[in-house]
Image (cartoon, grey):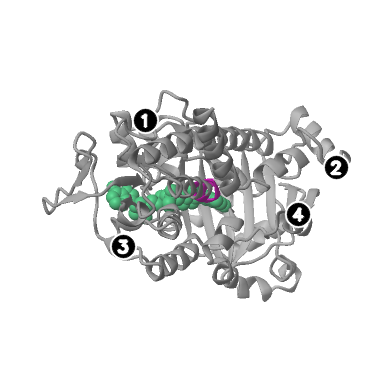
Amino acid sequence: MSDPTFQSNFHICIIGGGVVGLAGGILLRRQGFKVTVLERDATLQTVMRVLQEIGVFEKMLAKSIVPFSIILKAYSTGQVLHRQDLQEPADKYGAPLLTLHRADLRQVLYDEAIAQGVAIRHGIKIDVAGVDLAHGVLKLADTSETIQADLFVGADGGESVVRAALIGHKPKAIPHGKIVHRILIQEQDIIARPHLKYLVEKPNIIVWLGPECEAVTYGLDGVFNVAFTWPWSKDPKDIFWSAQSVDLDDFRAKLTSWEPDLREILSLGTSCLRWMFFEPVADDESTPWVDDAGKFCIVGDAAHRGLPYLGQGAAAGIESVSTLAQLLGKARNQDQVHEGLGIYQRLRKERTGHVIRATLRTGEIWQMADGPLQEDRDRRFLHETPTVGYPNPLADPFFQEWLWGFDATKTANDAWDAQQKARNS
Ligand SMILES: Cc1cc2nc3c(=O)[nH]c(=O)nc-3n(C[C@H](O)[C@H](O)[C@H](O)COP(=O)(O)OP(=O)(O)OC[C@H]3O[C@@H](n4cnc5c(N)ncnc54)[C@H](O)[C@@H]3O)c2cc1C
């Protein structure tokens, strides 16, 4: 039976108010659903086309830097190996590549979600025992409250309890063998040094390709972000779960062979934090993202946590939740919700699996040990015109079109229509 008021009577509860949960709240609200977001934090402190559709793009742009290009450099000499202009892809795909604080993006999405009528409850932490698949409800341990909804969407990040409940155990965390150090520098301190001003005045994303490591720098609304991917033990006993403070002098002492400008920027930093990277898993059919009853599903890092070498984590998550919202918006009864969840799972496992594998490959290429392979990579950067298999995948015209030219809404619509047609034929 088809019910035109179906969405307005259907309550979706999103667990996790990160970037993906909030974007999902807005997108599902726009499809007419009643939406609640549960977030464990007490307060709330690239996919640009989707953000344009959500209507937050202009607000986000005001907080963002629009880099001119992505520059790949040799770590020790600073020689420019490849410069990728970003204006042409911005024109081609209809939106620029932006750099901005995740907290700023989250705030813009939060404000919009509230404006759209999404109910957001803070200080609600769900544990795995509270995800009651058998009864299709959430139980809060602290208050004994039971939360009812027609659908629960787990957007609770890389340590997702909804994922743990769906697969029946806590996902295994395998160290990737790398960590990231982040140092934030006030841009005014860089501008005060005339020979470094160029880094801020004409913003670019710069990646220094080092042996088993890399450094990425970009501007973030008044601060300059330096992120160093660095080797780390793969031994599970060396896992750390939350950000740790690092002695910046000790870290700088390891960089004596790096380009002087980068070292000078780091001399302006006052603190450094590090995060652990875990091996991503590209799920196959055996790992459910949706439960049998069609009452629970996962999106974002909860479903497909990757690594940041292509800057795609949040982007892939927003694409996923956009696909989910589009498909659910077509449903007119519970069976069609189930059907939409199945299509969502199939489409997004396939695409995010490719993104995860391409990201891993990019890390391997950009973080090659010094030697013949690295020399051959650098020769290709310097002398070849980007084509299939070019060592900068973002400049490989085929991969770039696939990555940046993707239309989540159209893909979801086409897949839905194809399934209806196949059933009716
Ligand atoms: C160093 C680094 C650099 C990155 N760089 C980029 C980049 O350049 N571009 C990019 O696109 N991505 C990047 N990413 C990845 C990106 O940050 C993530 O993919 C993205 O934040 C995932 O969003 P999410 O909403 O799925 O999860 P999260 O951001 O992890 O949000 C999950 C939310 O759920 C809440 N939550 C968790 N558990 C519970 C629970 N049990 N109960 C209730 N609430 C809960 C959390 O408090 C949080 O608010 C980077 C990641 C790292 C670590």
Question: In this figure, which residue is indicated by the disc labeled 4?
Answer: 92
313 and 130: which one is in front? 130
What is the C-alpha distance between the residues marked 4 and 3?
37 Å
Question: In this figure, which residue is indicated by the disc labeled 2?
Answer: 382
Q: Nearer the viewer, mark 2 or mark 3?
A: 3
Q: In the picture, residue 265 is in which quadrant? A: bottom right
Residue drawn at (24%, 56%), measured in percent from left and top?
Answer: 124
What is the C-alpha distance between the residues marked 4 and 1?
40 Å
Q: Which of the marked residues, 4 or 1, is nearer the chain's N terminus?
A: 4
Tell me if 85 is positioned left or right of 310 in this view: right
Quadrant of the drawing holding the C terminus: top right
Q: Which of the marked residues, 2 or 3, is nearer the chain's N terminus?
A: 3
Q: Which of the marked residues, 4 or 3, is nearer the chain's N terminus?
A: 4
Question: In this figure, which residue is indicated by the disc labeled 3?
Answer: 120
Dot 2 and dot 1 residues touching (CB under 8 Å): no
Mark 4 surroundings: few (<14), some (14-19) or many (≥20) residues within 10 A:
few
What is the C-alpha distance between the residues marked 2 and 4?
25 Å
Mark 1 surroundings: few (<14), some (14-19) or many (≥20) residues within 10 A:
few
Q: Is residue 315 a member of the stretch shown in magenta?
A: yes
Numbered badge on residue 172: 1
Mark 2 surroundings: few (<14), some (14-19) or many (≥20) residues within 10 A:
few
- Of the residues shown, which amino acid type is indicated by label 4? Lys
Residue 288 vertical position relative to residue 112 in the rendered view, above or below: above
Predominant SS along the magenta part: helix
Q: Which of the marked residues, 2 or 1, is nearer the chain's N terminus?
A: 1
